[in-house]
Image (cartoon, grey):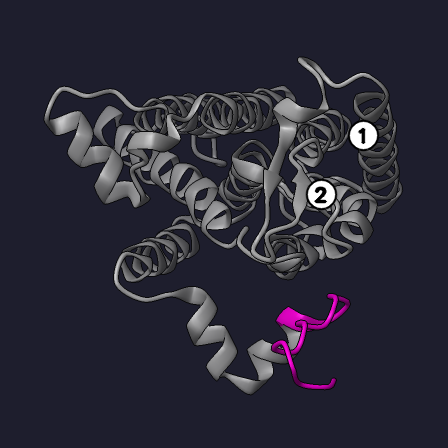
């Protein structure tokens, strides 16, 4: 089932409005107080994580409005909620004194019987991704014939891996103002314009990006794990709802390759050394302060 243009526009408006309203409400009364949600950014300045739950709320609302079917609504809700919930657990409960970094660090801790908040996030988002993929993958083909159980399970596994790895990859990009939101826009724009089942979810992503971008670029807010994982999971689910199997597998290959590369290569260094990427990454962002003793 396709989502018409009027409903896509409504989806974007709803997602943007809910993001803005929830962000304002959280600013007025943050659960546990503002200090609980305040971190230090790359400049050593305070920054709020409250953008994350606001973005997740916008994605959930937009996903319901723009879902192509009941199955699609369930898939988007489970994937987005899992990304947001387990991401927030890691945001608010991480033990910084024994901090593990990357999938390797968290999986290594699990292998030694230690469950970190990051490890719990990996397991929780992975489980949610599989449930979402199962909801999004029908047992019947478009011509009405029933698929084999093995084929269905293989599709669910691949789609679940795409949703989970997309959630993780977008979180890896949330290291500089606006970077993760810009990356999400590059994926969501073609999805929102497509005729696939993920068009509504693409429109929802564009709506929340529009509501969150200013504060993110101003370095007042950041997505954090809760917002970035939710955003990535929504995008992964949108691809699952829109794309045929070869495209889903190709997307999974790209996302996994980038994730593996991130264990060895700094995305920030690659971006800084690539003129086009550097220009896109820096658009709208505050300039880097010159070293002390030198003029701008």
The residue identified by callout 2 is 221
Magenta-colored segment: predominant secondary structure: loop
In this orientation, does residue 87 appear?
A: yes
Q: Quadrant of the N terminus?
A: top right
Specify whether 120 is left or right of 206: left
Q: Dot 2: what SS?
A: loop
Please tell me how crowded label 1 is: few (under 14), some (14-19), or many (20+) other residues with Cα within 10 Å.
many
Question: Are discs 1 and 2 less than 8 Å apart at CB?
Answer: yes
Q: Which residue is depicted at the point 65% across and 79% down?
A: 279
Image mark for residue 108: none
> As drawn, is 113 to the left or to the right of 139?
left
Quadrant of image for the C terminus? bottom right
Q: Nearer the viewer, mark 1 or mark 2?
A: 2
Where residue 172 sits in the image (x, y, percent)? 45, 51
Q: Quadrant of residue 4?
A: top right
Residue at the outermost left position: 112
Left or right of 86? Residue 238 is: right
Q: Which residue is mark 1?
A: 23
Q: Position of residue 114 (x, y in %)?
A: 19, 21
- Is 289 one of the magenta-colored residues? yes
Secondary structure, mark 1, is helix
Chain-order first, disc 1 or disc 2: 1
Q: Does residue 21 belong to the magenta stretch? A: no
Segment colored magenta: 281-296
Q: Residue at x 73, y 29 (%)?
A: 54
Q: Is residue 39 above or below residue 23?
A: below
| Residue at the farthest top position | 32
Q: CA distance from mark 1 to mark 2?
A: 10 Å
Quarter location, residue 9: top right
Q: Nearer the viewer, residue 15 or 229?
A: 229
């Amino acid at each position: 089932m396709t989502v018409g243009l009027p409903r896509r526009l409504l989806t974007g408006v709803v997602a943007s409005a809910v993001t803005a309203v929830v962000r304002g409400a959280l600013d007025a009364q943050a659960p546990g107080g503002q200090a609980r949600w305040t971190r230090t950014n790359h400049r050593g300045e305070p920054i709020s994580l409250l953008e994350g739950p606001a973005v997740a709320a916008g994605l959930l609302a937009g996903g319901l409005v723009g879902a192509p079917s009941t199955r699609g609504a369930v898939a988007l809700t489970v994937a987005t909620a899992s990304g947001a919930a387990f991401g927030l657990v890691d945001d608010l409960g991480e033990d910084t004194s024994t901090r593990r970094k990357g999938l390797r660090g968290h999986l290594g801790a699990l292998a030694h019987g230690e469950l970190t908040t990051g490890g719990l996030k990996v397991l929780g988002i992975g489980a949610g991704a599989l449930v979402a993929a199962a909801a999004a993958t029908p047992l019947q083909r478009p011509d009405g014939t029933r698929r084999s159980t093995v084929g269905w399970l293989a599709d669910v596994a691949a789609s679940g891996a795409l949703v989970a790895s997309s959630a993780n990859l977008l979180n890896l990009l949330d290291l500089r103002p606006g970077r993760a939101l810009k990356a999400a826009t590059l994926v969501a724009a073609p999805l929102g314009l497509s005729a696939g089942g993920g068009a509504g979810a693409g429109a929802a992503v564009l709506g929340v990006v529009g509501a969150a971008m200013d504060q993110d670029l101003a370095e007042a807010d950041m997505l954090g794990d809760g917002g970035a994982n939710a955003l990535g999971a929504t995008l992964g689910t949108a691809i699952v709802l829109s794309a045929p199997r070869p495209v889903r597998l190709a997307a999974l290959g790209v996302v996994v390759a980038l994730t593996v590369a991130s264990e060895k290569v700094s995305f920030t260094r690659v971006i800084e050394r690539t003129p086009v990427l550097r220009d896109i990454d820096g658009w709208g962002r505050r300039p880097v302060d010159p070293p002390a003793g030198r003029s701008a």
